[in-house]
Image (cartoon, grey):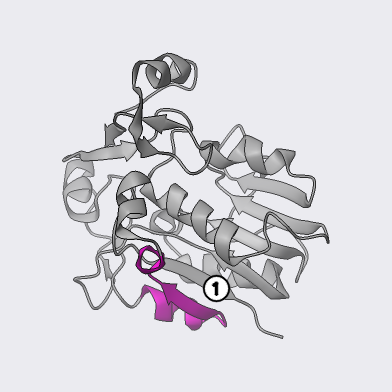
C-alpha cells in the first residue's frame, strides 16, 4: 500500500487511537496500515511517519544502545538511500553532520554510485545503508566501499530483506523476467535473496558484525505496541581500531 506524504495527516487523524504506537514520533493509533509486496503484512506501516517495522526497530536500537542522539561530539553520518521517516528528523539533529547519498533519489544530497563513493577513507562515524545491497549486482564492492568510508571505531547498520531459512544467499543472473524475479527474489529489482551467510559476507570485507535480535531485549507488550517484527535481526557492523 503506497501512501503519499501529502495525505498522511488525514489518514493519521482517521486512525487515531491508543492500541499501537510509533516510537519515532510517539503518536498512537487504533491500527497501523497494511504493507508489503504480494501478501501484505497487517499493522506494518505507521500512519504518521510512514515507518515500517525495520525502521522502528532501528530507531529503538539507536536510542537505547548508542550515543547517536546524545553524543556531545558532532557525529558525521552517511545515509545511503535515506528513508523518509528518518530524513527530516536526522537533518534537524544539532549533534549530527548528516549527509545523504543515492544514485537516483532526488532527496539525496550527493548523487553517487555505492560501488564508487566520492568520499574519503575513514570519513564517517556512522553509516546507514538499508534495503540497498539486494539491488546491487556487485554487493561485495559496495560492502568494501561502506567499510572504506567508515571511521575506525565507527559503526554501520546495513539492513536487508533476509530469508533465515536459507543457509546461503541465492543469486541467478539468468532470471531476467520481472514477474519471475519478483516471485523468486521478492521484488522485480532485487538481484538476490540473502541467507544466513549475509553476516559472513560483511565480515569478509573487514567488518566485525553483531547479529542482534533486538526484539529479545524489548518486552512482548512493547513488540506488539510498536508493531515490530519479532525475531528480525539487526546487522550492526563495526570497523575496529
Q: Nearer the viewer, residue 228 or 161?
A: 228
Query: Quadrant location of the N terminus?
Result: top left
Task: Tell me if I can see residue 216 in this picture.
Answer: yes
**Residue 13 pos. (x, y %):** 41, 17
**Residue 14 pos. (x, y %):** 35, 16
Residue drawn 66% across and 62% down? 126
Image height check: is 62 above or below 38? Answer: below
Query: Quadrant location of the C terminus?
Result: bottom right
Residue drawn 20% across and 38% down? 40
| Residue 216 horizontal side relative to residue 6, left or right | left
- The residue that disc 1 covers is 237
Magenta region, residue range:
198-217
| Residue 133 horizontal side relative to residue 208, left or right | left
Residue drawn 62% across and 70% down? 155
Image height check: is 28 above or below 209? Answer: above
**Residue 150 pos. (x, y %):** 68, 69
- Does 193 appear in magenta? no
Q: Nearer the viewer, residue 84 or 179?
A: 84
Amino acid at each position: 500500500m503506497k501512501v503519499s506524504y501529502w495525505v498522511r495527516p488525514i489518514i493519521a487523524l482517521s486512525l487515531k487511537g491508543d492500541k499501537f504506537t510509533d516510537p519515532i514520533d510517539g503518536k498512537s493509533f487504533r491500527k497501523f496500515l497494511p504493507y508489503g509486496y504480494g501478501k501484505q503484512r497487517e499493522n506494518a506501516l505507521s500512519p504518521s511517519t510512514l515507518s515500517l517495522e525495520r525502521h522502528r526497530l532501528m530507531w529503538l536500537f539507536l536510542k537505547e544502545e548508542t550515543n547517536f542522539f546524545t553524543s556531545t561530539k558532532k557525529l558525521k553520518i552517511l545515509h545511503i538511500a535515506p528513508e523518509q521517516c528518518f530524513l527530516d528528523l536526522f537533518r534537524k539533529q544539532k549533534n549530527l553532520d548528516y549527509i545523504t547519498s543515492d544514485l537516483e533519489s532526488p532527496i539525496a544530497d550527493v548523487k553517487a554510485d555505492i560501488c564508487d563513493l566520492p568520499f574519503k577513507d575513514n570519513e564517517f562515524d556512522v553509516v546507514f545503508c538499508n534495503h540497498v545491497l539486494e539491488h546491487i549486482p556487485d554487493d561485495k564492492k559496495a560492502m568494501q566501499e561502506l567499510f572504506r568510508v567508515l571511521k575506525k571505531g565507527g559503526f554501520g547498520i546495513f539492513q536487508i530483506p533476509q530469508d533465515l531459512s536459507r543457509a546461503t544467499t541465492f543469486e541467478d543472473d539468468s532470471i531476467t523476467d520481472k514477474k519471475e524475479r519478483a516471485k523468486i527474489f521478492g521484488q522485480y529489482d532485487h538481484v538476490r535473496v540473502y541467507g544466513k551467510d549475509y553476516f559472513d559476507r560483511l565480515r569478509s570485507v573487514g567488518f566485525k558484525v553483531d547479529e542482534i535480535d533486538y526484539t529479545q531485549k524489548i518486552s512482548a507488550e512493547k513488540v506488539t505496541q510498536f508493531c515490530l517484527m519479532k525475531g528480525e535481526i539487526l546487522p550492526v557492523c563495526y570497523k575496529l581500531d
